[in-house]
């Protein structure tokens, strides 16, 4: 598997985990968990974009 594809998949997974943590933090009124979810979601978005950029330069 190419690293660009791997980065995109891992980025999507981190985004999903982040959204779940964020919602769990909102439901339980836990601001730390909510913030952690937002951070993980952002990291996933960045990783996914890095994978997209790598894909452009692999060609």
Image (cartoon, grey):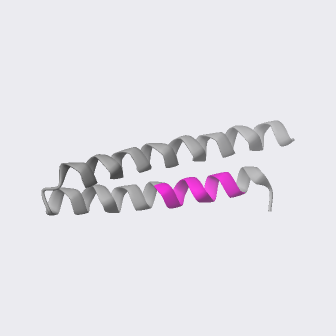
Q: Position of residue 42 (x, y in %)?
A: 44, 43
**Quadrant where the C terminus lies?**
top right
Q: How many marks?
A: 0
Q: Is residue 53 above or below residue 2?
A: above
Q: Give above or below for 51 relative to 24.
A: above
Residue 10 lies left or right of residue 3; in this view the side is left
The span picked out in magenta is 6-14
Outermost residue to the left: 29
* Quarter of the figure that contains the N terminus: bottom right
Residue situated in front as seen by the camera: 52 or 19: 19
Q: Main secondary structure of the magenta part?
A: helix
Residue 44, given in percent of the width and then of the height, sits at 51, 49
- Return the x and y of residue 10 as percentages of the image width and height: 59, 58
Left or right, residue 41 beside residue 59:
left
Question: What residue is rendered at 12% in x and 56% in y?
Answer: 29
Write the residue at 60% across / 41% down.
49
Residue at 52%, 61% (x, y): give it. 13
The magenta stretch spans residue 9: yes
- Asked which quadrant contains residue 33, the reply is bottom left
């Amino acid at each position: 598997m190419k690293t660009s594809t791997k980065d995109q998949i891992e980025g999507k997974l981190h985004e999903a985990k982040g959204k779940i943590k964020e919602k769990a933090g909102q439901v339980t009124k836990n601001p730390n968990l909510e913030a952690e979810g937002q951070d993980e979601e952002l990291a996933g978005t960045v990783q996914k974009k890095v994978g997209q950029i790598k894909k452009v330069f692999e060609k």
